[in-house]
Image: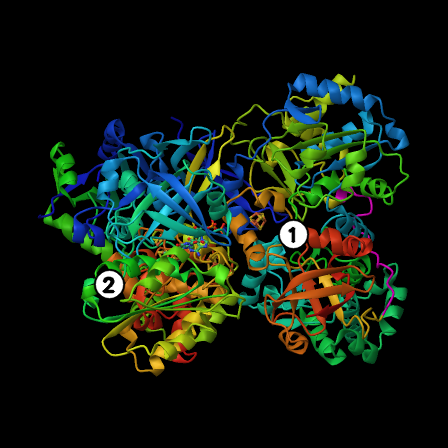
Amino acid sequence: MNLVNYKPCVCNLCGTGCGQFLKTDGHKVYGVSPLIAHPVSKGKLCIRGWHSNELLSTNERITTPLIRENGELREASYDEAIALVAARMQGFDGAAGEIGVLASARSSNEDSFTLARLTRDVFKSTLRGIGAEAGHRKSMAALEHAFGYPGAHGSLTAIDHADYILVVGTDITRQNPVIGGNIHAAQRRGARVVTLSSSRTQIAKLSTKHFQEKPGTLGLLVNALGKALMAIRTVNHDRRANIDQLPGYADYAAALRSISSVALERASGIRYEEIEEEAHHLEQARSIVILFSSGISGLDRPTIDAITNLALLSDRMDHPHSAVIPVAGISNLQGSFDMGMSGELGNSVFKALATPDSRIRALFVIDHDDGIIRDKERIAALDFVVYACAYKSAFMELADVVFPLPAYNETDGTYTASDKRVQITHKNVDSRHHVLPGWSLFERIANTSGQHWGYHSATQVFKDIAAHTRGYGDLSHELLSKGFGQHWNPKGFAGCGRRKFNAINIEYWESPTTPEFPFALMIGKAQHYWHQNNLMRKTIVPRREYDQTLWLYPQGYIEISPDDATRLKVRDKWLVNVRSSIGTHMKIAVKISPDVQDGTAYIPYFIKNMISDFLLPYENAYAAGEESVIPIQIQE
Amino acid sequence: MSMSMYILSSGEISALVTELQASYDVYGPQVEPQTKQVFFDQLATPAALDLEAPIPSMPVKEILFPQMERILKYKYDAENQSVAMSKQYFERPKALFGLRPCDLSGILVLDRFFLGQEFVDDVYLTHRRQCLLISNTCLHPFPQCFCVCTHSGPDADEGFDLDLTKLQDGYLLRVGSEKGQAIADAHQWQVATPLHAKEFKAVVDRSIDLFPEMATDNKAWVAKVMNRITTGFVKQETWEYIGDQCFECGACSFVCPTCSCFNIEDTQTPCGECERLRMRDSCSFEGYARMAGDHNPRQPVEDRRNKRFFCKLSYPQSKKYLRPGCVGCGRCQWVCPGDIGLPNVVQYIRREITGGQN
Amino acid sequence: MSNCHGNHEHGNCKTTGLCPIVTFPEVVNIDEIRDEIPEVKTFYLSFPNKDVEREFRIKSGQFIMCTVFGAGEFAVSLPPSPENDRFHISVRAVGKVTHALHALKPGDKLGVRGPFGNGFPFDEIKGKNIIYVAGGIGLIPLRSSIVHALQHREDFGRIILLYGARSSKDLMYQPDIREWQQNAGFETFITIDRPEEGWTGEVGYVNQLIEKANVPVDNSVAFVCGPPVMFNSVIGEFLKRGMSEDAIISTLERQMKCGIGKCQHCAVGRTLVCTDGPVYTYRQIKTLGEQI
Ligand SMILES: Cc1cc2nc3c(=O)[nH]c(=O)nc-3n(C[C@H](O)[C@H](O)[C@H](O)COP(=O)(O)OP(=O)(O)OC[C@H]3O[C@@H](n4cnc5c(N)ncnc54)[C@H](O)[C@@H]3O)c2cc1C
Ligand code: SF4
Ligand code: SF4
Ligand code: SF4
Ligand code: SF4
Ligand code: FES
């Protein structure tokens, strides 16, 4: 009998990157413990992290390669499946856009790096993408423009020391609870925590100040804060002068000056005087941390631009306890960008799938976690689909060849958290079925296609990553194994150190609601909106929690304020007809919530039939994430 | 029985561990080398035992009440309409070497809960039977400890087979049971003198003095708060203030040496069998109490937190445990991403009682 | 029973010396399945192991934990009388396990642990009038006590049943009801919410029957089981008429995982429904300090 011991690793269930111990005998996982010395999580985990043992011991694993034959998937050897994939892929013209590769934001850097190489060198394809990338690409573009490199500025640990913390939009105690906990702790030690959010989220309740703006005006509010700060700066002439030397300042300043307090109040519902008062706090803070959510439910580009501009304008960004962090919902979203798996602008796999006359014929997909498969019919009609994942999922049904992958604790790998902290997880359990790690699978496909990379270990792959990836040059597995990871070095980017304002436009967002469609409906906010629903459904206790909502509201729900409920004469759990301005409609239960403001309504993203029937026609709403609004009417 | 006492050298302690390893799985505090985190875990070698290590990060209950275990396996043959079942938990003799007094008290609470009452919990009993409990006096408190307020430390006064205290001359070993005496009788350990007994008392007193003022000061308050919680006189606003800070992670239950709640779920294995799994659960979760057909008697989060503190600090619950449900280990304070570990909740209720004045 | 790991403190052990099945489910055979009302089926069961069968003694108001192999375990009341009755359960399909149960055929096996719970008082109420008030499937937990009381008719004063359901299709145990209606010693009042063609019984809600039945409040006990709305209105009516809070008796339902007082899922206030309940007096329920 092997001794059961606690092995340190990194939680793989969101972009916080908490330290965690798994209790294991090298064959099975028996339990979880938090890691007290971890600089970010400091001995805390959220419900997902605390139940990773349930996920890691689920029976719902893919255990061998599978090949579809006469409509059914049958077991196959690696040799057979790899040979088949290599042969079929050679029949497609990758350079002409016939092969698409969809990477996973949960894969290790080693897997994503080798997958990028497979895509480029073997498939000769530029058609690639990452699930949940849309929002993150916007964050990366805005941050690169502002700070000279595509990644967070500063560290998540800054929260523990900063004077001022600004949370823009995100329901952070649900999506990245441990970061939420750190913010709450900061508030208690005396930091000023300010949340801008149209609904009264838990972090809003725990903040020093909550601005509950009307939907669609987050960016405007951030800019208004900029205007007020600039006004203070103009009076205090002794302040650092070089901010106004930065490129884009003049345009930015002019745009800020144009903000009218009357129009601001009308659009956002927030008085400029309140903003001015807030700006005084901002002015006095020596260190400032700004957090916003990035990924599929993240902010739109103008709002992120407003955030980076405010950060630069504050003139506090050189302080070691300042930061601007795009908080990712998925563990290695940042890393998969760094490894180059994000599609080129305007040329992603998603676009190819959604465009009826695109040339795509084959698809290579890793970890499709979402319960919702977009463009399902198109995928089903492709000539050849390869799928690789550790866990069974609905996507297998669409695949011609399926490969198993190890779970995150069954192989060595590095993961890059939201704040660029690269951390290593060492294999602590033997994969029960001798499953090849992703990098090794990709290498064998390359091999069979006539390319020899010569990787024998993840460590060796990482050497290549360090040699070829900007920012990663100083890192190695050896170094990362000592401590709790290290941020990648922005100095790897030539532009690092230069700062630029993003161009902004002041728009007083007019709510698209009309007397006929008086409610502003928003998607994506729900207590159990966990990105990895497919993963959470493989656990026991978190699955029960996730199902809670569905049990209470089997048809899904729409959240409205108590006053609106009274006006509509409806009670909690009553079914209502919801009709959108473009004519889609659904029947759904009402959930009355005091945290929602009058005239707004929320539906959770995860309820399947709502997405496909009601929301999918709203292509851009889906892509715009947190700030998108659909005008609707609600009738009893 | 009158308590025999002996003085053991470090060498004799190691020898005892080696000897026990012949007939028991021996568990003890050890320091994980990379992170310096302490776990109460099975010892590979006697050298791994570190009796001076701080309080283990996870409660010792993990050994007797695993985070998740398979209790039953069955295969249903639908064709023949028959079923084959087999029990999946087994007894092994275990020596828990170097228990902190709070963890020992935690085990006593679990004993009274799982083995007392109307029914005996067979799974717990199977893990618990044939356990040798060896406690270890805390010479000084660790951050967040407040066992002095909950009568569970810094020294153990009941429930152990053997108890260790580090003195000048070596370890003072106190015998607390016949099982412990039998082990002592099989050795030629040096019998302790009254001077040693006096030193023991001084060591414990010094340890108590080293507790932060807040902890000792809370002592009287724990009783007052218990009274308030039992009688239901804590204001709704206070529960809401507490509820707003709960992130519903379950951590407080998972690290608490006295939390015993579990969930049961039958799951299919790939080979057509079915396993009945029993896993820890937490009353902080919304799904913990919900019932089919739209009914959850404890849906608001503040009601669920209220449940926790009723469980830890109320007279009816203490009756089941024969002591307060909280043993003062402070772990829930460590792991709570909100700020509502038990000591803080005592503070909040105390603030309510005093109207803001501490 | 070899299977018992009780401290012999449990009601069953104390009164009968016979222990319930505590840890391992005992296999039972489904002998027969009857459609009761929409979504509710009754399953007639028997123990292949006759030793176990002989020692399996129940009290009215108790429940068992029933395993549907491959799906899980759930709590279910025992409708049969403790004496001379067929062992059966009546179950509404609401979720994962209960749906799996509904998919089974006669001859399939189930697992049973129990009986658990305190049960309804019987000896203590001898000589009193008994008023049974049930709504919908609330008749399931009451059936055992009704049949048992009728088996000992001479021990009680008036015995009255007030039973209501949404429609005539939703009335449980119709053969029993027909038999009861023939029983001169049993005053039955059956009502449905809305008038129906061919329905000659009462129309309206159960609480309205209290007046009609001219229920006695002195020297009486009322057993009330049904949905919360019904429960509250009926209780209100009884209290208004001066019935004592101790004489109103009901059962509580909570999520249950173990049935033996260990998992704590069923906690209500300071009590555990599986061991301290499921039968409570209204006075007790009021002081539990939680939603019903
Ligand atoms: C003392 C008692 C007696 C009962 N008697 C009957 C009866 O005679 N007939 C009948 O049809 N139903 C009865 N119930 C309710 C029955 O137990 C639930 O309907 C059943 O557990 C639902 O299980 P499920 O898996 O189908 O539902 P799911 O919704 O899938 O529930 C999953 C789990 O939650 C728990 N759970 C959910 N709802 C309940 C509930 N209401 N009570 C207890 N646990 C629950 C169970 O552990 C269940 O396995 C009784 C409940 C109790 C507590
Ligand atoms: S916050 Fe994220 S990384 Fe931390 S425990 Fe939760 S899921 Fe894991
Ligand atoms: S309530 Fe907290 S301090 Fe008390 S025993 Fe449990 S974990 Fe320790
Ligand atoms: S009810 Fe809550 S506090 Fe009490 S033992 Fe269970 S999990 Fe712990
Ligand atoms: S540890 Fe804190 S946040 Fe987590 S469930 Fe317990 S009280 Fe709530
Ligand atoms: S059902 Fe487990 S304690 Fe009551």
Crowding near the residue tagged with mark 2, few <14, some 14–19, many ≥20 C-alpha atoms within 10 Å? some
Q: Residue at x 49, y 62 (%)?
A: C168
Question: Please, is residue B157 above or below residue C72 in the view?
Answer: below
Kind of residue sitting beneath label 2? Pro
Which mark is drawn over residue A172?
none
Q: Quadrant of ligand 3?
A: bottom left
Q: Nearer the viewer, residue A590 or A372?
A: A590
Answer left or right for C36 relative to B325.
right
Chief secondary structure of the magenta span?
loop
Q: Nearer the viewer, residue A120 or A512?
A: A512
Q: Residue at x 33, y 63 (%)?
A: C182
Q: Position of residue C46 (x, y in %)?
A: 32, 40
- Residue matched to label 1: A155
Question: Please, is residue B46 above or below residue A213 in the view?
Answer: above
- Element assignment for label 1: loop
On the image, which quarter does residue C278 sit in? Answer: bottom left
- Mark 1 or 2, closer to the camera: 2
**Quadrant of the snapshot with the N terminus of chain A:** top left
- Residue matched to label 2: C121
Q: Position of residue A618 (x, y in %)?
A: 80, 56
Kind of residue sitting beneath label 1? Ser
Q: Which residues are magenta?
A: A491-507
Label 1 within 8 A of ligand 2 by Cβ: no
